[in-house]
Amino acid sequence: MSSSSRSVPAAERSAAAGGDGSERIFLVGLMGSGKSTVGRALAARLGRPYLDNDALLQQRTGLDAPALADLGRAALHDQESRQLHALLDTPAPYVAGVAASIADNPDDLGRIVDAGRVVYLRATPRTLARRVGRGQGRPWLDGDLLSTLNEMFAARDDVYRRVGHVVDTDGREPHEIAAELARLVGAG
């Protein structure tokens, strides 16, 4: 499968992010899209640290995703937003996997667009369902998994498409996607 080649217009990226926006690379997408796996592979290729918003959130709060989810969706998304703000204070360069809920927060979306290059790792709901399995450790996946992912995809796909370079991940290996992204930022 080939990837899309749509990028965020240069006018939308901040000069503070390194001109081409590649000093900070933010990976967005739904759970199971490959943010963590591709992010680690890309960071290794670029010789940068990989920062996972979910892992940093757990480290900061001492609570894992299910425990945070028990506090309610709004509380979890508030904590994810707070963690993103802390992430943005981290000196570049780095590759970061960002919480999927960012699609629901226009202010946070604007912050990452201004701070670096945004890449949407896009996968169909069927692929996402296969990747997340039974959804262990992932909030709100205890019912009909495919229906839930279809709803999330319908609500967030257009938002993600508007803010980042789109890379379709269906049927592709993480190392292949990481190589494409390294080329995109001029390091591959």
Image (tube, rainbow, N blue to C red):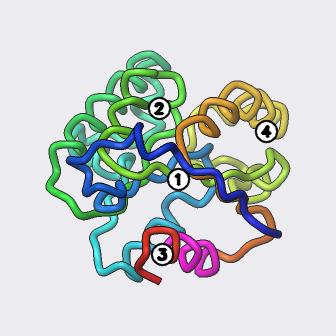
Mark identifier at residue 150: none
Residue 115 placed where, x, y %?
A: 29, 44
> In the displayed image of the protein, which residue is found farthest to the front?
11
Q: Secondary structure at mark 4?
A: helix
Q: 159 or 149, which is in the foreground?
A: 159
Q: Nearer the viewer, mark 4 or mark 2?
A: 2
The answer to whether residue 32 shows anywhere in this view is no
Say few, some or many: other residues with alpha carbon within 10 Å of mark 1 (under 14 / 14 to 19 / 20 or more).
many
- Span highlighted in magenta in the image: 174-181
Mark identifier at residue 102: 2
Whether label 4 touches label 1, CB < 8 Å: no
Give the mark, 1 or 2, whose residue is nearer the N terminus. 2
Residue at 14%, 55% in the rendered image: 91
Q: Secondary structure at mark 1?
A: strand
Q: Check disc 1 and report the residue beneath it.
A: 119
Q: Give the left or right position of residue 161, taking residue 64 as reference.
A: right
Amino acid found under the numbered disc labelled 2? Ile
Give the mark, 3 or 4, whose residue is nearer the N terminus. 4
Give the mark, 1 or 3, whose residue is nearer the N terminus. 1
Q: Secondary structure at mark 2?
A: helix
Say few, some or many: other residues with alpha carbon within 10 Å of mark 2 (under 14 / 14 to 19 / 20 or more).
many
Amino acid found under the numbered disc labelled 4? Leu
